[in-house]
Image (cartoon, rainbow, N blue to C red):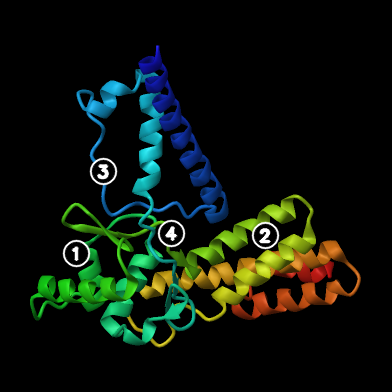
Amino acid sequence: MIATAKVNGERNSMYFLALATLYQDHRGDVHRKHQTLPSPRRHEPCRADSPVAMSVPVEDHAVLRLADRHHERIAVAPPVEIDVCGRFRLVVSGVRRDESIHQQGRLALAFLAVHRARPVSRDELELAIWGEGRTHDRGAALNTILSRLRRALGPEVIQSHSRTCLQLAEHVVVDYHLAFSLLAEAQDALRRASPEEAAAAADRSLQIAHGGLLHGESAFWLEEQRRELTELGLRARECIAEASLLRGGPELGTAADRAREIIRVEPLRESAHAVLMRA
């Protein structure tokens, strides 16, 4: 009886310790919101024939596995912000690091940032940095650039997918994509007839897009992204104008000003002329 009680007590202690760990993990996830990060290494799973596994009932194994995942996420990568709108800017753990990044490194990191939603092949990255010409060993040169970038960014920021593809980690904040997210928020707020919220989100999106893409840099692939950013700026102005029409009163002047700004860039844009007539 005493031995059985002791075993049960140890099982219960292990069970509630695991639950407590999971609760702390959950609270941390709430504070970090969407910043749950991968770990640079994985622990070996508990084998069925190990002494620990044999002393724990089958129904408790899931709890222990969940608790183990908590320890896998202890090594957290530093917060990273990459600004490619306007002039290039890199901030790691609140410290500016862009001064240590040279022109080829800026192009490489900017290309990964703009295309962060998918893995980028090494061939694409080489083309983005050097263009069509092939005057030297690009593979070795790219390795040097990536090594320097990884030193500046810290671990687990530039992630490898197989031997030929690279991708930025999910926790990296890129202002280019933030501008598009803010525009989507503004359009959603307009559909909900919330002009104040729409105007605030659209104005933030416009502020990001206003500086253009990688001011001072030149590369063939930048042209398409610059056109997309220009179009985003026009749509953000339209959102501000529509929100101002909904608010009425003195805001009608703001609607007219934004419509005129759009027409100066794109004289035949019908939506801007429609706003101007309503204002």
Q: CA distance from mark 1 to mark 2?
A: 37 Å
Instruction: Say few, some or many: other residues with alpha carbon within 10 Å of mark 2 (under 14 / 14 to 19 / 20 or more).
Output: many
Instruction: Say few, some or many: other residues with alpha carbon within 10 Å of mark 4 (under 14 / 14 to 19 / 20 or more).
Output: some
**Which element type, helix, strand or loop, lies under badge 2?**
helix
Does label 2 or label 3 sit earlier along the sequence?
Answer: 3
Q: Are marks 2 and 3 in contact (CB under 8 Å)?
A: no
Residue 109 showing in the rendered view: yes
Residue 7 lies left or right of residue 270; in this view the side is: left
Which residue position is annotated with label 2? 186
The residue positioned 78% from the left and 63% from the top of the image is 196
Horizontal and vertical percent for residue 193? 79, 53
**Which element type, helix, strand or loop, lies under badge 3?**
loop
Horizontal and vertical percent for residue 250? 89, 75
Height in image: 191 above or below 132?
A: above
Does label 4 or label 2 sit earlier along the sequence?
Answer: 4
Q: Quadrant of the N terminus?
A: top left
Which residue position is annotated with label 4? 171
In this view, the residue in front, 151 or 104, is 151
Instruction: Say few, some or many: other residues with alpha carbon within 10 Å of mark 3 (under 14 / 14 to 19 / 20 or more).
Output: few
Residue type beneath disc 3: His
Residue type beneath disc 1: Asp
Which residue position is annotated with label 3? 43
In this view, the residue in front, 220 or 269, is 220
Residue type beneath disc 2: Ala
**Which element type, helix, strand or loop, lies under badge 4?**
loop
**Which element type, helix, strand or loop, lies under badge 1?**
helix
Labels 3, 1: front one: 3
Does label 1 or label 4 sit earlier along the sequence?
Answer: 1
Q: Residue furthest right?
A: 249
Residue 87 lies left or right of residue 270; in this view the side is: left
